[in-house]
Image (cartoon, rainbow, N blue to C red):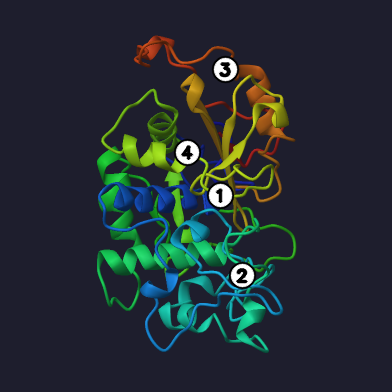
Amino acid sequence: MTCGVTERDGTDPVTTSTRFEIGSVTKTFTATALASDVVAGKIALGDDVQTFVPSPYVVPSAPCGGSSATMTIKDLATHNSGLRDDPKNATWSDTMPSGRAAYNVTFLWQSFSTGFAQPCDALLFTPGTKYSYSDWGFGLLGTILADKYQPGQPIPPYGPMIADKVTGPLGLTATELEGPPYADMAKPDCRKGVSTPCWFDNFNAFAGAGGLVSSITDMATWVGANAGFAPSSLAPAVELTHEPHGIGPDCDTCMGLAWEISPKDHHKLVPFDLLVKNGRTYGSTSQVFLAPDACWGTALLANDAVIDLGMSGVGGDVIRAVGPTSPCPSPSPSPTPASVPVPLVAQPVAVTPAFTG
């Protein structure tokens, strides 16, 4: 379902093929590409990140005054790496959107030391011991996977890698890296204080953290593949991303690969654990909720950076209204289209006309 217009004060209506910046929901695609390689035996979650970083660059292993530990691929995928949210040599800020497009692999490799008094300052804690959300970690993970897919490219081939491993097998034709000419895009409604235009343009070495755009049609397919009512060849990889692999914000086993696992006793919205991922750019917001045990999910997209699509806002309202109450049918989930829980829910009309969901 859709509502609203593609640009604030505009007249062109949003359609099911209109594409939106999905920001950090991109991380779930990065994690699925990783899981696909893990299932294929091409990489292991316990691999040392240093083995994928060229000499002479050194991945930090201990915070200043703290104990040392190897930073692993799993640490990057669960926000357990200890790396800060953004590196010190970031070429963007909270009010200046330009920069991600020019952030190349050289900047990324140099990020472990540039701007820090000493390398240990790059870490907030010993890798693998705590949770702290890190775009830096997922940017690094996306570039590692892309460089492994096609080594030595001046711009990491994150887009082709995701197309080959994830979006292609699922037929997600509208999901790709953002960039000019912004075809079929809803224009981001730049938040206050941000210079315009505020296209995210995260297609270089930070792409794995938030570079994709998508339509609500594609996101419905993505929800189906993850929620279990649209089985695919990616099922083993998808299931691996849902398993508890690390320390999360709610408990010591509350992080899948990119997905935050919210226990049912924590959110109390439905009688199932929820997998949650949100995204936010300078002018757009996205949110996905999954209840795989109930074969249910929903996705919300908006070209508005202020709206709350999370559990405390529209997302919570959606879950309370149409969230699941029963588990998947036994012995295997195979619902007919008429019985599939609605994966897309529209924002109440009272909210800004820039919204779609």
Task: Tell me whether circle 2 and circle 3 mark residues in contact (CB < 8 Å).
Answer: no
Task: Give coordinates of residue 2: x percent, y percent.
Answer: 52, 31
Judged by depth in the image, the label closer to the viewer, 4 or 1, is 1
For the residue carrying disc 1, how many other residues have a C-alpha within 10 Å: few (<14), some (14-19), or many (20+)? many
Q: Are marks 4 and 2 in contact (CB under 8 Å)?
A: no
Label 2 belongs to which residue? 86
Q: Where residue 167 sits in the image (x, y, percent)?
A: 32, 45
Inspect the image, locate mark 3, and give the three-letter code of the amino acid beneath it. Answer: Pro
- Structural distance between the alpha carbons of marks 4 and 1: 11 Å
Q: Quadrant of residue 144?
A: bottom left
Instruction: Give residue 312's position: percent from left, percent from top.
Output: 74, 35
The residue depicted at 58 percent of the width and 27 percent of the height is 346
Q: Quadrant of the C terminus?
A: top right
Residue on which disc 3 sits: 324
When the figure is inspected, residue 107 is found, relative to residue 234, above or below; the finding is: below
Evaluate whether residue 80 shows in this view. Answer: yes
Q: CA distance from mark 4 to mark 2?
A: 25 Å
Which is in the foreground here, disc 4 or disc 2?
4
Please tell me which residue is depicted at 56% across the width and 31% down the height of the picture. Answer: 3
According to the picture, the residue beneath numbered tag 4 turns out to be: 242
Element at label 2: loop
Q: Is residue 4 above or below residue 265?
A: below
**1 and 3 marks in contact (CB < 8 Å):** no
The quadrant in which residue 148 appears is bottom left
Residue where numbered disc 1 is placed: 246
Res 350 visible: no
